[in-house]
Image (cartoon, rainbow, N blue to C red):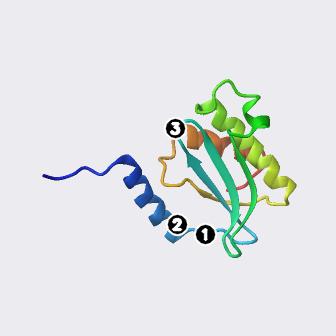
């Protein structure tokens, strides 16, 4: 009997394929997105040295205090503005968007659009 792959396995395979094509540099770090069932996590990563330059998530008290729910499109948009603000404070203006194997719609698209509006270029 043929076993169907789980959505998590499919996403991880897509993410590995994406990571072969893109990497963050010092001039243009990687904006990595991770979604769980209840929260979202975003990091700005310099892959040449393996350092996280800025991060934000809906788990943080100052971020989640302004949100009604932590796993919807509005929360993703708010998280996009927060990560853009933190990255700009660190001097990062251009990034490479790593969607983490997730389909570019809904929460991931809302996060990306909000980060672009807040000043990040990608």
Residue at the far bottom in the pictured view = 48
**Residue 72, percent across and down?**
58, 31
Horizontally, residue 24 falls left or right of residue 65, namely left
Q: Where is the C terminus found, in terms of image quarters?
A: bottom right
Badge 2 vs badge 1, beta-carbon distance below 8 Å: yes
Q: Residue at x 74, y 48 (%)?
A: 83
> Circle 3 is placed at which residue position?
37
Q: Residue at x 12, y 52 (%)?
A: 1
Q: Please tell me whether mark 3 sits on a helix, a strand or a loop.
A: loop
Q: Residues within 10 Å of mark 1 (few under 14, many from 20)?
A: some
Q: Please tell me whether mark 2 sits on a helix, a strand or a loop.
A: helix
Horizontally, residue 98 falls left or right of residue 3, namely right
> Circle 2 is placed at which residue position?
19
Picture quadrant of residue 23: bottom right
Q: Residue at x 63, y 27 (%)?
A: 69
Vertical placement of residue 91 versus 116, above or below: below
Vertical placement of residue 101 versus 38, above or below: below
Closer mark to the observer between disc 2 and disc 3: 3
> Circle 1 is placed at which residue position?
23
Q: Residues within 10 Å of mark 2 (few under 14, many from 20)?
A: some
**Residue 11, percent across and down?**
43, 53
**N-term mark: 2 or 3:** 2
Distance from Cα at disc 1 to Cα at disc 3: 26 Å
**Residue 107, percent across and down?**
57, 38
Distance from Cα at disc 2 to Cα at disc 3: 23 Å
**Residue 31, percent across and down?**
66, 57
């Amino acid at each position: 009997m043929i076993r169907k792959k789980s959505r998590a396995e499919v996403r991880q395979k897509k993410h590995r394929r994406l990571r072969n094509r893109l990497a963050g540099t010092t001039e243009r770090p990687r904006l990595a997105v991770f979604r769980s069932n209840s929260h979202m996590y975003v990091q700005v990563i310099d892959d040449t040295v393996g350092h996280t330059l800025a991060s934000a998530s809906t788990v943080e008290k100052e971020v989640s205090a302004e949100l009604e729910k932590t796993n919807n499109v509005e929360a993703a948009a708010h998280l996009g503005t927060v990560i853009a603000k933190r990255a700009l404070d660190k001097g990062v203006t251009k990034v490479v968007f790593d969607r983490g194997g997730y389909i570019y719609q809904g929460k991931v698209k809302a996060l990306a659009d909000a980060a672009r509006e807040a000043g990040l270029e990608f």
